[in-house]
Image: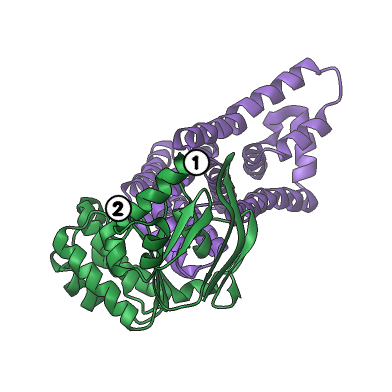
Chain colours: A purple, B green
Amino acid sequence: MLKILKYSFFDLSRSLWSYVYFLFYLFLGIVLLFLNNDLSNAVITLMNVIIILVPLIGTIFGVMYYYDSREFTELLLAQPIKRRTIFIGQYLGVAISLALSLILGLGIPFAAYGLFESAIIWNFFSLLVSGVFLTFIFTALAFNIALSNENKIKGFGLAILLWLFLAVVYDGIFLLILVYFQDYPLDKFALIASVFNPIDLSRILVLLKLDISALLGYTGAVFKQFFGTSQGLIISFGVLALWVVLPVYRIIRISAKKDF
Amino acid sequence: MVSIKNLHKKFGSLVVLNGLDLEIEQKGIIAILGPNGSGKTTLIKSLLGMVVPAKGDIEIGGEKVRDHWDYRKDIDYLPQIAHFPGNLKVNELIKMIKDLRGKDARDKELIEFFKLEPFLDKKLNNLSGGSKQKVNLVLCFMFDSPLIILDEPTSGLDPVSLLRLRDLIQQEKAKGKTILITSHIMSFVEEVADRIVFLLEGKIYFNGSVSELKSSTGQTDFEHAIANILTKNNA
């Protein structure tokens, strides 16, 4: 496994796109910090960017890497290596390198700004944790889609659709339901619905950490009541972890049956 | 060495292997022939576990193939089309495969044999088809495994390299290895093969030596004997 991971990582570290991604975060971090002067605001802006961009990049990179490395995969399949090792190694290679780009790209400017002496470090930390989770979730989902679709165009299309659904459409439907059924008590529903979408879940986790849940009104209070407790926090991280584990499990299952 | 029982495989509605049985006990060169789409590559990929058969058993060296992977350390495989990660250099690729196999390799000897030295620092994307095939051959032959599977080893090679390949295959045979070959170049097959396995519609149609094939079809020429099987079955 480590060897496959090493080579996937090595392969990606030679790709220009990994650096573009890293430099983008570096640039974003510097601009936000030194133009904003307010760490809390910078974290909120960053959250809005991360919550949309990290899933998109994870999805696209995951699909692209899978299709791009098909040759490499076929070469590996004829070697005495377990299938599971090959695919999980490649998945981890992509996810870890993306997560590192994120952590280093944002971490460096924040560290340079003197973040470690401020109390906001935990907000920043929760932001990075959500970002890393989202990277692992969406890369795994992308690998699932790519493994099930031989046709690249179809695979890319489905991956983008999945991202669009979870990042935009889901919220739209959510909002419509809230407006349509506003006469009913919906706080339980809102809570459950947001747990099922990793993007919403991450957003709420960061927002609550930032202590601006008052902005969310009554629902915000309900959310705070749930997510603010350690039990709620454990459940949320459990769900995020499930969002990683289930797609990874499916990668193992599909790849074991697939013909190459 | 290799034992295949009642092997079935479908791709969608297309039946590729239809109850194929094959026993390979002897050493030497066995040519797997058949028209396009007769299941040669699918058979080979099933041996390697790259294609998962719908039904049937394959054993290699007494070990079941399904859900196993360890047996592949005793197989050298040459894929039909040389697909390599394009942004790697030739020597990086060779180093990587050596590292993954963790076995002694005679890569230097083979690089010299196929005159690949000038290409070692080039990226695989920039190599010609023939040079890629030579890299493919080096990767395949550098581990000294008892079973060698060659899927269209001649494709893209110039006449000089073809002669070298022929020598190499004979050398490996002399070491007492079992070599499975598919090829569309009949003169090549006739010259090297000890035994012919002819696939037709996912089954074995003929299994024997070249001279047996000639006598069973009543042809004196190998190419005509093969053509005879094909026309008889299409008529």
Q: Quadrant of residue A225?
A: top right
Q: Nearer the viewer, mark 2 or mark 1?
A: 1
Residue depicted at x 53% and y 36%: A159
Q: Quadrant of residue B167?
A: bottom left
Relative to the observer, which residue lies in front, A247 or A74? A74
Mark 1 surroundings within 10 Å by alpha-carbon count, few (fewer than 14), some (14 through 19), many (20 or more):
few
Q: Where is residue B56 in the image (x, y as percent from the top left)?
A: 64, 60
Residue depicted at x 39% and y 62%: B215
Residue that carries the numbered disc 1 in the rendered image: A150
Q: Where is residue A29 in the image (x, y as percent from the top left)?
A: 42, 44
Q: Is residue B17 left or right of residue A240?
A: left
Q: In which quarter of the image is the C terminus of chain B?
A: top left
Residue B81 seen: no
Q: Is residue A61 left or right of residue B225?
A: right
In the picture shown, does residue B118 fall above or below A235?
below
Relative to the observer, which residue lies in front, A69 or A243? A69
Q: Which amino acid does label 1 sit on?
A: Glu
Q: Position of residue B25 (x, y in %)?
A: 50, 77
Q: Position of residue A9 (x, y in %)?
A: 41, 59
Q: Residue B86 carries which label?
A: 2
Q: Quadrant of residue B225?
A: bottom left
Element class at badge 2: loop
Q: What residue type is labelled 2?
A: Gly
Relative to the observer, which residue lies in front, B160 or B135? B160
Residue depicted at x 75% and y 46%: A228
